Amino acid sequence: MPERGKLVVVTGPSGVGKSTILEEALAATGAQFSVSATTRPPRAGEQDGRDYRFLERAAFEQMIADGELLEWAEVFGRYYGTPAAPVREALAAGRTIVLDIDVQGAFQVHEKMPDATFVLVVPPSEAELARRLRGRGTEDEQELARRLAKADEELAAARSSGVYTHEVVNDELDRAVRQLAEIVAG
């Protein structure tokens, strides 16, 4: 029987810099990234199958009905979720696989796979998170306010849950990458 791999679940509010940190930590460790599925449209430069599996709403709802998702949520009117089969295959093959999901999804994964490693990426401050979100230029002020309120809720829920064993503050990119790489490799 092959060695069981390691599952690392990384969460944090929108705009905290998870994607940047993850990209560099994955390159440093050789861990495999789990490609999530979503019903939101691709952003500029995103590719289907690399960044997300971009699905129509009906296809996503069929995956929910068929129990094909390790976790899923509806966030800001769009579905996001993790197809279970690729994660289970990677773990069975002894590989380390990393999920980039929201707090709600992490709680679902924890129910199914409590031995996973859970990492919360946090901003150095709410003001810095707002600055980063504005800098992306993808949300209007109303959407920005919703995302910041959601970030406060997510961080409070995550910190009080007892699920997270690691917290990485993204105040200095190189340090945050090093910390996450050590957690993934450890």
Image: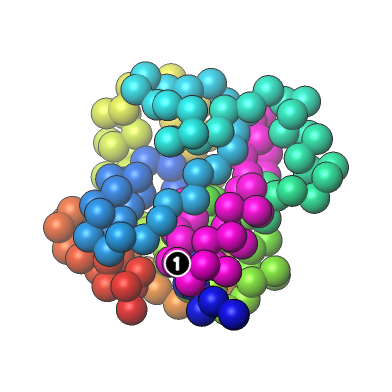
Quarter holding the N terminus is bottom right
- Does the magenta segment cover residue 115? no
Quadrant in the rendering for residue 30: bottom left
Q: Which residue is mark 1?
A: 95
36, above or below 146, in the image: below
Q: Residue placed at 49% from the left, 55% from the top?
A: 99
Q: Nearer the viewer, residue 167 or 68?
A: 68
Looking at the picture, tell me which residue is in the foreground, 179 or 95. 95
Residue extent of the magenta highlight = 73-100
Question: Looking at the image, which residue is at 45% across and 67% down?
Answer: 95
Whether residue 149 is situated above or below residue 170 in the rendered picture: above
User: In screen coordinates, is 167 left or right of 99?
Assistant: left
Q: Position of residue 127 (x, y in %)?
A: 30, 44
Q: Name the secondary structure under disc 1.
A: loop
Q: Is residue 21 visible?
A: no
Please provide percent x and percent y for residue 19.
34, 45
